[in-house]
Amino acid sequence: MKLSYRGVQYEYTPPTLEVTEGEICGRYRGVEWRCRTVVDNGAPVRSTRSDSVSAPLQDTMSAARLTQPSILPEVRRLHYANLRNNIERRLQTAQAQGNRALVRALENEFEELLCRA
């Protein structure tokens, strides 16, 4: 594919990946979608993309790194820390505004988050 950037012409060949169809993952508005497995250097990575376009190589490599067992607990910990900080910030704002209904709702949300973490 010939492309141009700021007047410089160059040839671009997108990376190709081997994609295999998997089982049915779910249904959305009556349409079933199938899980796809992208094989990269022998390491399968599961994808739930419903279109026929394969994921870019960078996304595939990121997904492969996230499937490593040592990374998942850290990602989960950071995710819940971010959620907790967000709720605390929103709670402080609701308290400053005197919005009791929102304060109760945020406190309930915070309790649910603590139960899931």
Image (cartoon, rainbow, N blue to C red):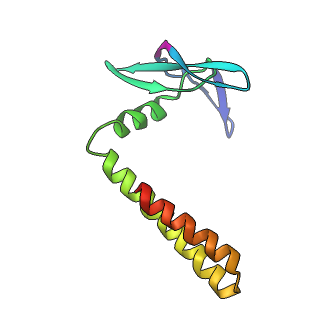
- 108 over 17 or under it: above or below: below
Q: Residue at position x 56%, y 64% from top?
A: 109
> For residue 80, what is the image quadrant?
bottom left
> For residue 2, what is the image quadrant?
top right
- Seen from the viewer's position, the closer of residues 71 and 6 is 71
Q: Residue at position x 39%, y 52% from top?
A: 76
In the rendered image, residue 48, in percent from the top left (x then y), is placed at 54, 26
Q: Quadrant of the C terminus?
A: bottom left
- Seen from the viewer's position, the closer of residues 101 and 9 is 101
Q: Residue at position x 26%, y 44% from top?
A: 70
| Residue that lies at the very extreme toward the right in this rendered image | 29
- Is residue 20 on the magenta stretch? yes
- Seen from the viewer's position, the closer of residues 90 and 3 is 90
> For residue 68, what is the image quadrant?
top left
- Seen from the viewer's position, the closer of residues 61 and 117 is 117
- Is residue 70 on the magenta stretch? no
In the rendered image, residue 8, in percent from the top left (x then y), is placed at 64, 34
In the rendered image, residue 15, in percent from the top left (x then y), is placed at 49, 22
Q: Residue at position x 44%, y 20% from top?
A: 38
Q: Quadrant of the N terminus?
A: top right
For the stretch drawn in magenta, the main secondary structure is: strand
Q: Is residue 88 left or right of residue 104?
A: left
- 99 over 68 or under it: above or below: below
Range covered by the magenta-colored residues: 18-22
